[in-house]
Protein backbone atom coordinates (compact mmCIF):
# COMPACT_ATOMS: atom_id res chain seq x y z
CA UNK A 1 0.00 0.00 0.00
CA UNK A 2 1.41 3.39 -0.91
CA UNK A 3 1.63 6.37 1.43
CA UNK A 4 -1.25 8.28 -0.20
CA UNK A 5 -3.60 5.30 0.16
CA UNK A 6 -2.56 4.84 3.78
CA UNK A 7 -3.17 8.52 4.54
CA UNK A 8 -6.56 8.40 2.82
CA UNK A 9 -7.55 5.36 4.86
CA UNK A 10 -6.40 6.99 8.10
CA UNK A 11 -8.32 10.19 7.37
CA UNK A 12 -11.40 8.19 6.35
CA UNK A 13 -11.35 5.93 9.40
CA UNK A 14 -10.43 8.52 12.05
CA UNK A 15 -12.83 11.19 10.79
CA UNK A 16 -15.55 8.60 10.14
CA UNK A 17 -15.25 7.20 13.67
CA UNK A 18 -15.48 10.73 15.06
CA UNK A 19 -18.49 11.64 12.89
CA UNK A 20 -20.46 8.42 13.36
CA UNK A 21 -19.58 8.06 17.04
CA UNK A 22 -20.52 11.64 17.80
CA UNK A 23 -23.89 11.39 16.05
CA UNK A 24 -24.71 8.02 17.61
CA UNK A 25 -23.88 9.39 21.07
CA UNK A 26 -25.88 12.53 20.35
CA UNK A 27 -28.96 10.64 19.12
CA UNK A 28 -29.03 7.95 21.79
CA UNK A 29 -27.83 9.72 24.94
CA UNK A 30 -27.16 13.44 24.72
CA UNK A 31 -30.27 14.69 22.90
CA UNK A 32 -32.70 12.72 25.11
CA UNK A 33 -30.88 14.04 28.19
CA UNK A 34 -31.05 17.63 26.95
CA UNK A 35 -34.76 17.20 26.27
CA UNK A 36 -35.34 15.69 29.74
CA UNK A 37 -33.60 18.71 31.27
CA UNK A 38 -36.26 21.02 29.84
CA UNK A 39 -35.29 24.70 29.57
CA UNK A 40 -32.03 24.01 31.41
CA UNK A 41 -30.99 21.70 28.56
CA UNK A 42 -30.34 24.78 26.47
CA UNK A 43 -27.22 25.40 28.54
CA UNK A 44 -25.72 22.16 27.26
CA UNK A 45 -26.56 23.10 23.68
CA UNK A 46 -24.99 26.52 24.19
CA UNK A 47 -21.83 24.94 25.62
CA UNK A 48 -21.58 22.68 22.55
CA UNK A 49 -21.93 25.72 20.28
CA UNK A 50 -19.17 27.55 22.15
CA UNK A 51 -16.94 24.54 21.51
CA UNK A 52 -17.73 24.84 17.76
CA UNK A 53 -19.69 21.60 17.53
CA UNK A 54 -21.56 22.80 14.43
CA UNK A 55 -18.28 23.55 12.66
CA UNK A 56 -16.21 20.54 13.77
CA UNK A 57 -18.68 17.74 12.99
CA UNK A 58 -19.41 18.87 9.40
CA UNK A 59 -15.66 19.17 8.73
CA UNK A 60 -15.18 15.61 9.98
CA UNK A 61 -18.07 14.49 7.77
CA UNK A 62 -16.68 16.23 4.68
CA UNK A 63 -13.21 14.76 5.25
CA UNK A 64 -14.78 11.32 5.68
CA UNK A 65 -16.82 11.66 2.50
CA UNK A 66 -14.04 13.09 0.33
CA UNK A 67 -11.49 10.50 1.42
CA UNK A 68 -14.14 7.80 1.00
CA UNK A 69 -14.93 8.87 -2.56
CA UNK A 70 -11.25 8.72 -3.46
CA UNK A 71 -10.85 5.33 -1.79
CA UNK A 72 -13.93 4.06 -3.64
CA UNK A 73 -12.51 5.38 -6.92
CA UNK A 74 -9.24 3.56 -6.29
CA UNK A 75 -10.75 0.26 -5.17
CA UNK A 76 -13.35 0.20 -7.96
CA UNK A 77 -10.90 0.89 -10.77
CA UNK A 78 -12.23 4.37 -11.45
CA UNK A 79 -15.86 3.66 -10.51
CA UNK A 80 -16.01 0.66 -12.84
CA UNK A 81 -19.63 -0.43 -13.27
CA UNK A 82 -18.45 -4.03 -13.34
CA UNK A 83 -16.82 -3.75 -9.89
CA UNK A 84 -19.62 -1.62 -8.44
CA UNK A 85 -22.06 -4.34 -9.55
CA UNK A 86 -20.36 -6.97 -7.38
CA UNK A 87 -21.69 -7.76 -3.92
CA UNK A 88 -18.70 -5.96 -2.40
CA UNK A 89 -19.26 -2.96 -4.67
CA UNK A 90 -22.95 -2.76 -3.85
CA UNK A 91 -22.25 -3.11 -0.13
CA UNK A 92 -19.67 -0.33 -0.22
CA UNK A 93 -21.87 1.86 -2.42
CA UNK A 94 -24.84 1.40 -0.06
CA UNK A 95 -22.67 2.53 2.85
CA UNK A 96 -21.42 5.50 0.85
CA UNK A 97 -24.94 6.51 -0.17
CA UNK A 98 -26.12 6.17 3.44
CA UNK A 99 -23.37 8.52 4.59
CA UNK A 100 -24.26 11.08 1.91
CA UNK A 101 -27.92 11.02 2.96
CA UNK A 102 -26.87 11.31 6.63
CA UNK A 103 -24.70 14.33 5.77
CA UNK A 104 -27.56 15.97 3.87
CA UNK A 105 -29.96 15.51 6.80
CA UNK A 106 -27.31 16.79 9.21
CA UNK A 107 -26.65 19.95 7.21
CA UNK A 108 -30.23 20.70 6.18
CA UNK A 109 -32.16 19.63 9.31
CA UNK A 110 -29.97 19.19 12.39
CA UNK A 111 -27.58 22.11 11.97
CA UNK A 112 -30.23 24.81 11.38
CA UNK A 113 -32.37 23.50 14.26
CA UNK A 114 -29.39 23.41 16.63
CA UNK A 115 -28.30 26.92 15.63
CA UNK A 116 -31.78 28.24 16.41
CA UNK A 117 -32.52 26.16 19.54
CA UNK A 118 -29.61 27.33 21.72
CA UNK A 119 -30.17 31.08 21.49
CA UNK A 120 -33.95 30.64 21.69
CA UNK A 121 -33.64 28.55 24.88
CA UNK A 122 -31.39 31.23 26.38
CA UNK A 123 -33.84 33.96 25.39
CA UNK A 124 -36.77 31.99 26.85
CA UNK A 125 -34.94 31.72 30.18
CA UNK A 126 -34.74 35.51 30.37
CA UNK A 127 -38.41 36.15 29.60
CA UNK A 128 -40.93 36.67 32.37
CA UNK A 129 -43.61 34.04 32.91
CA UNK A 130 -46.37 34.44 30.37
CA UNK A 131 -47.51 33.67 26.84
CA UNK A 132 -44.35 34.97 25.16
CA UNK A 133 -42.14 32.70 27.27
CA UNK A 134 -44.51 29.76 26.78
CA UNK A 135 -44.40 30.28 23.00
CA UNK A 136 -40.58 30.43 23.01
CA UNK A 137 -40.35 27.28 25.15
CA UNK A 138 -42.81 25.49 22.85
CA UNK A 139 -40.63 26.40 19.87
CA UNK A 140 -37.54 25.13 21.73
CA UNK A 141 -39.32 21.83 22.33
CA UNK A 142 -40.35 21.61 18.67
CA UNK A 143 -36.76 22.19 17.59
CA UNK A 144 -35.51 19.57 20.05
CA UNK A 145 -38.01 17.04 18.72
CA UNK A 146 -36.87 17.84 15.19
CA UNK A 147 -33.25 17.33 16.22
CA UNK A 148 -34.12 14.10 18.03
CA UNK A 149 -35.90 12.59 15.03
CA UNK A 150 -33.30 13.84 12.56
CA UNK A 151 -30.50 12.68 14.84
CA UNK A 152 -31.94 9.17 15.01
CA UNK A 153 -32.14 9.04 11.22
CA UNK A 154 -28.56 10.27 10.85
CA UNK A 155 -27.31 7.80 13.47
CA UNK A 156 -29.13 4.91 11.74
CA UNK A 157 -27.78 5.90 8.32
CA UNK A 158 -24.25 6.21 9.70
CA UNK A 159 -24.61 2.79 11.30
CA UNK A 160 -25.50 1.39 7.87
CA UNK A 161 -22.43 3.15 6.45
CA UNK A 162 -20.15 1.75 9.16
CA UNK A 163 -21.49 -1.78 8.65
CA UNK A 164 -21.02 -1.44 4.89
CA UNK A 165 -17.46 -0.19 5.22
CA UNK A 166 -16.55 -2.86 7.76
CA UNK A 167 -18.06 -5.77 5.87
CA UNK A 168 -17.70 -5.12 2.13
CA UNK A 169 -14.53 -7.22 1.83
CA UNK A 170 -16.25 -10.26 3.34
CA UNK A 171 -19.49 -10.38 1.32
Image: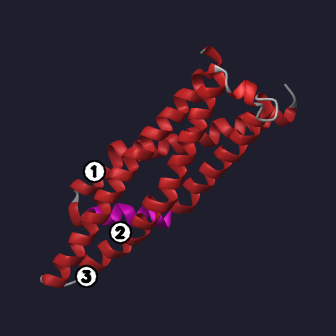
User: Residue at point 59% right, 26% down?
Assistant: 91
- Residue 89 in the figure: left or right of residue 3: left
Q: Residue at x 73, y 25 (%)?
A: 83
| Extreme residue in the top direction | 170
Asked if residue 39 lies left or right of residue 66, the reply is left
Badge 3, how many Cα within 10 Å: few under 14, some, many 20+? few
Distance in Å between CA atoms under marks 1 and 3? 22 Å
Please rate how many residues cluster around mark 1, counting C-alpha atoms within 10 Å: few if below 14, some from 14 to 19, many from 20: some
- Judging by the rendered image, the residue that carries numbered circle 2 is 117
In the rendered image, which residue does mark 1 sit on? 33
124 vs 170, nearest the viewer: 170
Q: Is residue 147 above or below residue 112?
A: above
Query: Which quadrant of the view contains residue 76?
Result: top right
Under circle 1, the secondary element is helix
Q: Is residue 46 left or right of residue 141?
A: right
Instruction: Give the mark, 1 or 3, whose residue is nearer the N terminus.
Output: 1
Q: Assess whether residue 43 is covered by the magenta stretch.
A: yes
User: Split into 4 quadrants, where in the image is the C terminus?
Assistant: top right
Q: Position of residue 64 (x, y in %)?
A: 65, 44
| Residue at x 23% of width, y 58% of height | 37
Q: Pointer 2: residues within 10 angstroms few (<14), some, or many (20+)?
A: many
- Residue ID for mark 3: 126
Instruction: Determine the secondary structure under disc 2.
Output: helix
Q: Reading the chain from its start, which is encountered first: label 1 or label 2?
A: 1
Task: Give the Cα distance between marks 2 and 3.
Answer: 14 Å
Amino acid sequence: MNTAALLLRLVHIVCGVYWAGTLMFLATLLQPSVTDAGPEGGKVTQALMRRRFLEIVPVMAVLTILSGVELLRRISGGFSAEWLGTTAGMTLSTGALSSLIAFTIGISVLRPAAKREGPLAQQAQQLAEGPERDAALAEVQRLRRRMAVGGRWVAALLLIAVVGMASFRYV
